[in-house]
Each structure stands twice: as structure tokens, then as C-alpha cells.
Image (cartoon, rainbow, N blue to C red):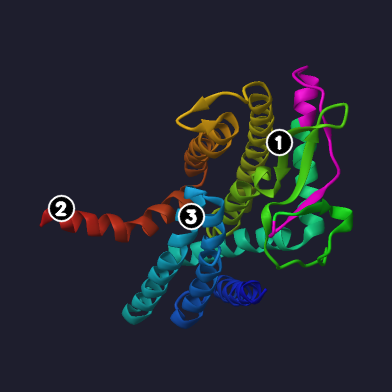
Amino acid sequence: METEILRLIVAIIGLSALGYSFHHKKSSDAFISSMGWFGISLFFFLDTPHYVELADPVLILMSASALPLGIAMCIWAYKNQKSGNFEPALLWLEGCVFWSALPYLAISWIPYLSVGLVWFTAAQAVFVLRITGISDLVLGAPHVEYADGTTSLFSEFTGNPWLHLEPLGEGGFYIPILSQDGSPVGVSIILACSALQSMIVFVGALVALQKSPWKSRIRCLIITIPLIHFLNVFRNAGIIYLDMNFRNWNWLGMGMFEFAHSYAAKIGSLFAMFLIAIVLFEILPELHNNILRLMEPITKKRNENQQR
């Protein structure tokens, strides 16, 4: 519990500092920017042990690299202040992180919101399977998996349903998928299945733009969010179908669910996000310019090393 309180404190400090810096155009104030970057990066870094327990290599890499990246942003902010430079791309990134992390953390910390989103996600996957005639499935009652591995109905949840900070098990708040006779099919839908992370990143990136007209940004949101959502619905339905029909399949020690969920679906999602980003770059050149500017310190260093 102490670790979760620490994560809550650093998240509030980090988000408050980034939000203030972005909305008050204080990116030249290195202290405020650095406090924000260090706080939010430390928050995500503290998740690393949890992902190690889950043995998720992608999330381990992302969470473990958060703190070094946050420190790098702090150094960049101080260098800009020392040289008297104003970096619009850095200000955009502050707004992007603020408007991405704020709604995501609100949903993940408020059980009622988490369960509502998980139910919405599960209902659509089951709907697709039913209307296509693939499988006649139903939704089970919302459940919660605790850190010790025990589970219970969400209606019997022992924590605070309005703000829960204690770590839960791998399933967290989940909806089991059932056959018509009420027996579980072996797959459950959790918060990570909602594609909330992917959608909220694009929302933050578009909202934080400074020079692009709102009309163009709203048009991009209308293109991006529904597309990611519908792709994710079919992704979830596909994983359920593959697991139910090819459960005995095995490749390099991986079962069908692990292969489809942890590897094939994630690679496909990253590729889809890449294609969506290319489309947004064409509509909003400012977004593309900000990305290139943030990559410049890395590419510049690489070019210097090659010249040597």
C-alpha cells in the first residue's frame, strides 16, 4: 500500500507540473518541467516489478525505460533554459503526456469506470462473434482478481469502488466470457483489452497541438478513435475465436492464446498505429514536425558518431 501511495503522490506532482507548464506556456521554466517529467516517469517506472511478475517483455521494457527517458527530458529542459531557447516540441510533449495520462489514470484508479469500460469492450467482442455466427457466447458477471490470486464478484469487492490504489492480480477487474450453458470458455476481458492506451495517446497528441486548427484536430480524432476502437473489437473477437478452436495448438512452447494475444495482436496493433500516424502526419504537419524535432538529439548524435 505504501508503494501505491507513493505512486499516487508522484503522479499528482508530475501531472500537475506538466499541466501547469503546458497550459501556462512555462516550458522555459526548467524546474517546473523537470518536476513534471521526473514525477510522471517515476510513476511508470515503479510499475516495472509488477510487469516482471507478469513476464510481459514489452511492458517491462516500456516501464523500465520510463525513468531514464524522464531524466533525459529534465536535462533537455535545463539545457534549453541555460541557452535561452524555447522548444515548442518539448511543450507539445508535455501537453501530450498530460492529456494522455490524466484520463487513463482516472479510469484505472476508479473501479466503477474500469468495470464499465471492460464490460463495454467485452459486450462488443461477444456481439461480433454472435452476429457472424461464429459462436453464441454471453457475458459473465464482473469479477475482480486480487494480488494474492483470489477472485470474487465485483459486487463483493472489498476495496473502495471510487478510488482503489492497492495492486490487483493480473486480471484486475475482468468480465469472463461464458458459453450459453454458463460454463467459462477460458477467456476473460480486462482493461488492457479496451485499447484505451492506444486511443488516449492519440487524443493527447492531437489536443496538445498549438498551431493546428481545431477543425483539423477534431477531424483527425473522428478518424483515429473509431478506427482504433473497431480494430480492437475484431482483435478481441479473433483472439477468443482462435483460443476456443485451436487451444491445443503449440509453437515454440507457446499456446494459441499467448501467441495471438502477446505477440501477433501486439505486432498488428503497432503496425496499425504506425499507419494511422502516417495519415495524421499528412493532415497535421505540426504533429510530424514535433516528432522529428524530439528525435533530433538522437539522430544528431548518431550522425556525429558516424562522422568520427
Residue 27 in percent (x, y) is at: 48, 74
In the image, residue 272 lies at what x, y percent?
Answer: 53, 35
Q: Where residue 306 is drawn, which disc sits there?
A: 2
Foreground tag (2 vs 3): 3
Residue 171 in view, yes or no = yes
Task: Locate residue 114, reporting x and y percent.
Answer: 76, 54
Distance between mark 2 and mark 3 Cα atoms: 31 Å
Badge 3 density bin: few <14, some 14–19, many ≥20, Cα 10 Å: some
Answer above or below: position of 4 versus 304. Answer: below
Regarding mark 3 in the picture, which secondary structure is present there?
helix
* N-term-proximal mark, 1 vs 2: 1
Total tally of numbered discs in the picture: 3
Q: Is residue 244 left or right of residue 21?
A: right
Task: Answer with mark 2 or mark 3, whichever residue precedes in sequence.
Answer: 3
Which quarter shows the C terminus?
bottom left
Nearer-the-camera pick, 34 or 236: 236
| Sequence order check, earlier mark of 3 and 1 | 3
Q: Verify whether residue 152 appears in magenta.
A: no
Q: Which residue is disc 3 drawn over?
A: 60
Helix, strand or loop at mark 1: strand
Badge number at residue 187: 1
